[in-house]
Amino acid sequence: MSFRVFMPTSEEELQTLLSERSCILAGGTDLLVKIRLKRVIPDRVISLRHLKGFDTIEDLGDSLRVGCKVTMSELLNNDAIIKHGKILEMALREIGSPQIRNRATLVGNIVNASPAGDSIVSMLLSNASLSIGGPTGERVERISDFIKGPGLTSLANGEFVKSITFEKTGAFFPQFHKVGQRNAMAIAVASVGSLISESEIRMAFGSVAPVVVVPVEACEYYSRSGEAFDEDRFIELAMKYVTPIDDVRASSWYRTTVIKNLISRTLKVWRKRGYDAD
């Protein structure tokens, strides 16, 4: 297998290179594995290395915008992310090793569209939207609409993700719980991310459905129940969204058991307002 590598220096040049069998290379931590395993067979690989203007983290007031070349390590060392995007920081620390985070990008992890994507969980909770460039101009799409299935997105031929914008979530109590086959550098068997306040809960599950899912009914129940909130009822509503499969990492039964325990753990930690709640 052979392919040509291009390194455009402008967005206009990038647009002329994009084709049906071209792949964009940012960090390469997902793409190079897919090429090696022949899951992707490109005619051309387009490196973003020399592309200017897509490596910034911008504070927009109520939100933050991250360019498609920004690595996970850069995000973890950014003061605005630490202060206003704690849920993203928590999720990123669960991804790979420091060496992988030095190369991997947030946008690349989103475009990979894995049902186990830790960063996708955090971005759904943060109401993220993607700025997508293409031959007909630029469009904006919510991450909840962008991901269509395992490895599938709404990107059309000739389009690429320029940046991702998401809400500041410092007003919420953040949690990210994940179970893998080992304690570090593991793809999630199941994960639960949440942002909670007295009046609102945002929750998302990884690895228990074809895409990362938000238990909408359960979240709505929390908002309207007030002092009458019943934890068992919340869990019952949330579990409606859990449709796991058996695969090499875990059985459907195990994932279902784990996710239920992680939801319970999340609510318990919130009640005690402490991450060391037993």
Image (cartoon, grey):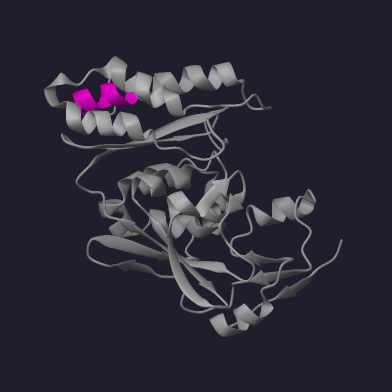
The image shows residue 223 at horizontal and vertical percentages of 21, 33
In the figure, residue 41 lies in which quadrant?
Answer: bottom right
Q: Residue furthest right?
A: 1
The image shows residue 111 at horizontal and vertical percentages of 55, 55
Up-down relation of residue 157 to residue 96 (above or below): below
Side (left or right) of 56 relative to 13: left
Magenta-span inclusion, residue 270: yes
Is 107 in front, or is 89? 107
Is 29 in front, or is 233? 233
Up-down relation of residue 209 to residue 12 (above or below): above
Side (left or right) of 187 relative to 70: right
Residue at (16, 34) in percent of width and height:
198
The image shows residue 121 at horizontal and vertical percentages of 43, 42
Name the quarter where the C terminus is drawn. top left
Considering the whole magenta stretch, tell me its main secondary structure.
helix
Is 247 in front, or is 70? 247
Up-down relation of residue 205 to residue 264 (above or below): below
Side (left or right) of 9 relative to 20: left
Residue at (57, 61) in percent of width and height:
155
- Is residue 274 in sight in this rendering? no
Residue at (49, 60) in percent of width and height:
71
Side (left or right) of 164 relative to 200: right
Magenta-span inclusion, residue 87: no
Q: Residue furthest left?
A: 227
Q: Which residues are magenta?
A: 265-273
- Is residue 161 in sight in this rendering? yes
Name the quarter where the N terminus is drawn. bottom right
The image shows residue 252 at horizontal and vertical percentages of 59, 21
